[in-house]
Image (spheres, grey):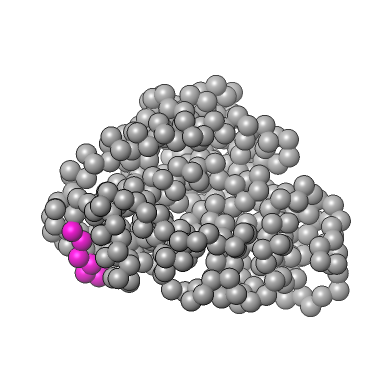
């Protein structure tokens, strides 16, 4: 690497704090992580470069995930990735999104019929509600497995623990099969899905793939999307709990059959809690030069949404929940909760429509009085909320 001061970083302890301490207020930092050279990008031009340069890709650091997810769209590179993306892109185009939303709007109001007045853990209800509405729309299923879905989500999260260097694969209960880490709970869930899902834009295309690719892509979709959607809506209400003025604006707007303020609130939630990924890792595949700095082949390139989204140079009062800030688009490449470039999340358009609708629907049906919250952050590939958010519900 070009001659620059080098800091040591360790992601196995508190990576969010470590990244923020080194990155916030700086355009870039040269780091050392073990034996790896790392270039941390924290300026719009550098982030665009990291996401879009043809000689920068997922690389060896991200290949840890391929042991868990196989060669799905999340872990693939180059022409293989482009071919997969072309195959899967129709599953989230405008027509597909319309079909998903039709299913959500048909099922979601009925799902709320089971909610009862009184003191409840809203976080638990939100997880169940978003989970049920999403898998019905996307997979045509009432459930993903005959087991407790939380068990499946916990197993899927183990891959991110390995990614952070906190576990050594395969941990207890897992086993190696043809170089990939497997678990009976995941195998059983995918077999159940394949046997029972109904035709949707996604399942129709997944059914055309060969068995291994179908397994890999489905596992990737589950790992990358399900927990993140449920987490986002919980974080939104967690932030409303701390900001009563914003919550009142959200309720007033939603009860006029609008999702405008809910969409602003979702953007602001994903700024503070980017559930789809707080760290994007890349690698240089050839010698590069940016801003006059030499970046050797094999350098790990880090882009952290947690750091950029909370950088006071780009967001005033960065730690405050202010949905109105998204009334105007943020500066390019300062906000990227769904990643960027060729690896931009395919499900982004659907999430940006579905989640505001679901959040708004809840307060159209219920008055909510916040009582207490014990939500804590559990760090995985996304930022998972863990704990209880107690409220008093009263059907309107």
Where the N terminus falls, by quadrant?
Answer: bottom right
Query: Magenta span has 172?
Result: no
Q: Is residue 383 above or below residue 222?
A: below
What segment carries the magenta color? 367-375
Residue ID at (78%, 54%): 284
Q: Residue 110's image quarter?
A: top left
Residue ID at (74%, 65%): 39
Query: Magenta span has 371?
Result: yes
In the rendered structure, the answer to whether residue 262 lies left or right of residue 58 reads left
In the rendered structure, the answer to whether residue 29 lies left or right of residue 16 reads right
The one of 341 and 130 positioned closer to us in this rendering:
341
The one of 252 and 159 positioned closer to us in this rendering:
252
- Residue 3 rendering spot, x and y as whole percentages: 86, 74
In the rendered image, is residue 61 in sight?
Answer: no
Residue ID at (72%, 62%): 46
- Residue 293 rendering spot, x and y as whole percentages: 84, 67
- Residue 169 rendering spot, x and y as whole percentages: 59, 51
Give the main secondary structure of the magenta stretch.
strand
């Amino acid at each position: 690497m070009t001659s620059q001061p080098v800091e040591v970083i360790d992601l196995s302890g508190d990576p969010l704090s470590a990244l923020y301490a080194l990155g916030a207020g700086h355009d870039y930092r040269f780091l050392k992580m073990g034996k790896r050279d790392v270039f941390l990008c924290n300026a719009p031009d550098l982030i665009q470069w990291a996401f879009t340069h043809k000689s920068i890709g997922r690389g060896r650091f991200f290949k840890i995930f391929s042991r868990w997810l196989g060669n799905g769209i999340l872990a693939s590179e180059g022409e293989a990735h482009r071919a997969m993306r072309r195959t899967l892109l129709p599953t989230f185009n405008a027509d597909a999104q319309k079909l998903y939303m039709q299913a959500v709007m048909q099922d979601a109001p009925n799902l709320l019929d089971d909610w009862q007045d009184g003191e409840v853990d809203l976080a638990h209800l939100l997880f169940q509600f978003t989970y049920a509405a999403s898998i019905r729309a996307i997979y045509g299923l009432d459930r993903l497995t005959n087991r407790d879905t939380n068990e499946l989500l916990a197993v899927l999260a183990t891959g991110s623990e390995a990614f952070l260097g906190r576990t050594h694969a395969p941990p207890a209960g897992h086993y190696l099969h043809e170089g990939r880490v497997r678990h009976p709970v995941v195998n059983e869930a995918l077999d159940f899905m394949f046997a029972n899902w109904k035709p949707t834009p996604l399942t129709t295309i997944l059914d055309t793939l060969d068995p291994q690719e179908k397994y890999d892509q489905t596992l990737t979709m589950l790992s990358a999307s399900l927990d993140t959607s449920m987490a986002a809506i919980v974080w939104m209400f967690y932030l409303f709990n701390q900001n009563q003025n914003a919550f009142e604006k959200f309720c007033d707007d939603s009860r006029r059959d609008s999702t405008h303020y809910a969409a602003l609130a979702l953007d602001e939630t994903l700024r503070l809690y980017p559930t789809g990924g707080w760290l994007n890792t890349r690698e240089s595949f050839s010698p590069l030069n940016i801003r006059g700095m030499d970046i050797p082949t094999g350098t790990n390139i880090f882009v952290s949404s947690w750091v950029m989204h909370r950088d006071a140079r780009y967001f005033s009062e960065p730690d405050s929940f202010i949905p109105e800030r998204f009334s105007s688009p943020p500066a390019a490449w300062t906000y990227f909760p769904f990643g960027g470039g060729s690896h931009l999340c395919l499900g982004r358009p659907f999430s940006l429509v579905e989640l505001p609708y679901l959040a708004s629907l809840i307060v159209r049906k219920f008055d909510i009085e916040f009582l207490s919250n014990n939500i804590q952050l559990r760090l995985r590939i996304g930022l998972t909320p863990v704990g209880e958010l107690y409220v008093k519900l009263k059907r309107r």
